[in-house]
């Protein structure tokens, strides 16, 4: 349909899939001439996964049921009427927010362009290590895991760089798997070293929880170096590309120590997937400059929103995405109805997102322990395991990917 109004969503993970379901369930049917609208989801991957599960999943396919860890995106949207939803497996190449079009490249290498009536960018962020997410798709992730697993069986030492939850969980899972739970850094079968540039690991948690995490890690054969940075790595791309993923490497540290290791995992931060956008829409840290209350990308013009790790609306966290979905969904619906000619009295009131900045982070430490806090309250180790450590949120993702979580309009 030449006159079709496309509601384009770029990104096929927590934010993108959730907004697509929310729009299909609560917005399309409320629009005048609803047949003229189509929700279009563009994602470089044909599948979605619980990305927080990577620290354990990278060890073996036996760690999780693969049909729960990965889900096919197309099948999650087969419930909707024909023609109302379209999935495009492609990498976004450019967005012209003035001409209101998206350019993308499909797997065959063909560049295509699609106009949009509304746009939501939910492209997330890429990890430094190819072991920790779709960089760019599920095929590359599985190839990384296969290569890492082949090298893991003969590894004599491992270094994990970074003091955040991903690096701590990764070191703990490897320690649990390789050394058991009654080891020490001195007696470990495979010594594992964490190198953190911060004065404590897990800097989003109180110091006492960080200290507890160090004690648990020690029993898994993990040594922790804080206030220490990796200055040089040889070979330069060790751990960063599939080609050099398992290359033995030599690290020089800011404390003048030199470490040679069989496996190096740089779990140091992420890079927002925003290179296809105009620099005028980005913050100095390359996130999309987003209104923290409404989720609109104000500089881009009407009906353009952003959510998730690519956006500046809140700190990167799954719970912040899930809290923001009803706000963005409501405000997008409101703006679409107004654009369709509805009056203020006939559209929902604007919702405001407010980030909960209380201490909230759960960090499993192997398959039986963990540290964490929720809404400012310390959570005992057993409950960290019960809530997250059992399966890294797989008990929650089925309803999320299928849209059942968004059945009711918040």
Image: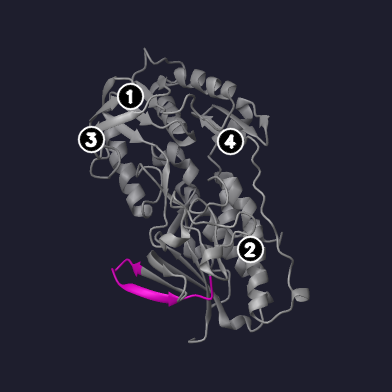
* Mark 4 residue element: strand
Picture coordinates of residue 393 (x, y %)? 56, 43
Asked whether residue 83 is drawn in magenta, I would say no
Q: What percent of the width, then of the height, locates residue 277?
A: 42, 62
Q: Secondary structure at mark 3?
A: loop
Q: Which mark is residue 361?
A: 4
Quick check: 21 above or below 156? below
On the image, numbered disc 3 is attached to which residue?
247
Would you say residue 27 is visible in this rendering?
Answer: no
**Residue 6 in sight in this render:** yes
Q: Separation of disc 1 and disc 4 at Cα? A: 28 Å
Q: Which segment did they paint magenta?
A: 105-118
Q: Earlier in the sequence, mark 3 or mark 4?
A: 3
Residue sitting at x 42%, y 55%: 273
Is residue 299 or residue 15 the one in the foreground?
Answer: 299
Against 173, residue 101 (above or below) is below
Q: CA distance from mark 3 to mark 4?
A: 32 Å
- Name the element at disc 1: loop
Q: Nearer the viewer, mark 1 or mark 4?
A: 1
Say few, some or many: other residues with alpha carbon within 10 Å of mark 4 (under 14 / 14 to 19 / 20 or more).
many
Q: Is residue 170 shown above or below 143?
A: above
Residue positioned 65% across, 65% down in the render: 331
For the residue labelled by badge 2, is the local secondary structure a helix, a strand or a loop?
helix
Mark 4–mark 2 Cα distance, whole angstroms, equals: 26 Å
């Amino acid at each position: 349909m030449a006159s079709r109004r496309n509601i384009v969503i770029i990104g096929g993970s927590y934010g993108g899939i959730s907004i697509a379901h929310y729009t299909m369930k609560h917005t399309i049917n409320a629009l005048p001439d609803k047949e003229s609208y189509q929700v279009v989801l563009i994602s470089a991957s044909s599948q979605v996964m619980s990305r927080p599960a990577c620290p354990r999943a990278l060890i073996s396919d036996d760690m999780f049921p693969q049909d729960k860890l990965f889900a096919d995106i197309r099948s999650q949207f087969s419930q909707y009427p024909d023609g109302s939803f379209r999935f495009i497996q492609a990498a976004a190449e450019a967005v012209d927010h003035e001409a209101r079009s998206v350019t993308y490249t499909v797997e065959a290498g063909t560049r295509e362009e699609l106009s949009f009536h509304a746009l939501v960018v939910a492209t997330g962020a890429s990890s430094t290590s190819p072991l920790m997410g779709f960089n760019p798709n599920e095929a590359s992730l599985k190839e990384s895991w296969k290569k890492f697993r082949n090298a893991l069986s003969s590894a004599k030492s491992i270094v994990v760089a970074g003091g955040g939850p991903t690096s701590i969980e990764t070191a703990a899972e490897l320690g649990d798997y390789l050394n058991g739970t009654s080891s020490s850094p001195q007696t470990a079968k495979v010594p594992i070293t964490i190198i953190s540039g911060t004065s404590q690991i897990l800097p989003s948690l109180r110091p006492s929880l960080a200290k507890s995490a160090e004690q648990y890690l020690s029993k898994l054969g993990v040594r922790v170096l804080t206030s220490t940075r990796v200055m040089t790595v040889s070979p330069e791309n060790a751990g960063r590309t599939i080609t050099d993923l398992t290359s033995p490497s030599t690290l020089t540290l800011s404390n003048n120590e030199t470490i040679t290791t069989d496996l190096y995992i740089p779990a140091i931060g992420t890079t927002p997937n925003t290179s296809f956008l105009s620099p005028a829409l980005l913050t100095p840290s390359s996130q999309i400059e987003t209104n923290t209350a409404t989720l609109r990308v104000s500089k881009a013009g009407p009906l353009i929103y952003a959510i998730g790790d690519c956006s500046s609306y809140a700190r990167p966290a799954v719970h912040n995405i899930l809290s923001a979905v009803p706000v963005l969904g409501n405000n997008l619906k409101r703006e679409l109805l107004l654009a369709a000619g509805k009056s203020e009295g006939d559209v929902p009131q604007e919702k405001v997102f407010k980030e909960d900045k209380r201490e909230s982070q759960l960090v499993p430490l192997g398959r039986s322990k963990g540290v964490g806090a929720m809404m400012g309250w310390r959570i005992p180790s057993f409950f960290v395991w019960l809530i997250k450590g059992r399966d890294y949120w797989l008990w929650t993702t089925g309803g999320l990917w299928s849209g059942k979580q968004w059945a009711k309009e918040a």
